[in-house]
Image: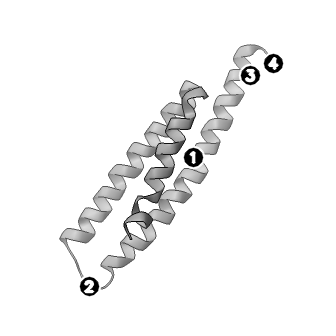
Amino acid sequence: MAIWVLSPFVALLLAIVASKRRSVLARVTLFGVTLVMTLSSLAIYEAAALWPRNSQGAFVFIVVPPASWLLSAIVVPIAAFISGRRSRRADGV
């Protein structure tokens, strides 16, 4: 279960390490996505842990990681595309 919950964060960490050659815009977007995803996931997990209602508490731990993967899969390529277009425009191409 811990691997399931932590997997989006490990993927983002690997993306941050690999983004050293990307533009500043792409790295800032990646850092922003990481921050938003971390804080929102912690808030959701905290609410599920402190106020357990019934068996739906486990549902949160199953749904949040795929939602995090989806957010990463949408935002990171868009940021890379936008930063690539801006860098080409700055180069005069």
Residue 73 in the figure: left or right of residue 61: right
Q: Quadrant of the C terminus?
A: top right
Q: Earlier in the sequence, mark 4 or mark 2?
A: 2
Kind of residue at disc 3: Arg
Q: Which comes before the other along the chain, label 1 or label 2? A: 2
Report the amino acid beneath label 4.
Answer: Val
Q: Residue at x 64, y 36 (%)?
A: 80
> On residue 88, which mark appears?
3
Give the label on residue 93, or none: 4
* Numbered mark located on residue 75 in the image: 1
Amino acid type, label 1? Val
Amino acid under disc 2: Asn
The span from disc 4 to disc 1 (Cα, nearest Å) is 25 Å
- Residue located farthest toward the left when viewing the structure as drawn: 50
User: Would you call the spot at circle 3 few (<14 residues within 10 Å), some (14-19), or many (20 or more)?
Assistant: few
Percent x, y of residue 10: 46, 51
Q: Which numbered circle lies on residue 54?
A: 2
Residue under the image location 25 percent in, 66 percent down: 47
* Sequence order check, earlier mark of 4 and 1: 1
Asked whether 82 or 13 is in front, the reply is 13
Spatial CA span between label 1 and label 2: 33 Å
| Secondary structure found at label 3 | helix
Q: Mark 4 or mark 3, which is nearer the start of the sequence? A: 3
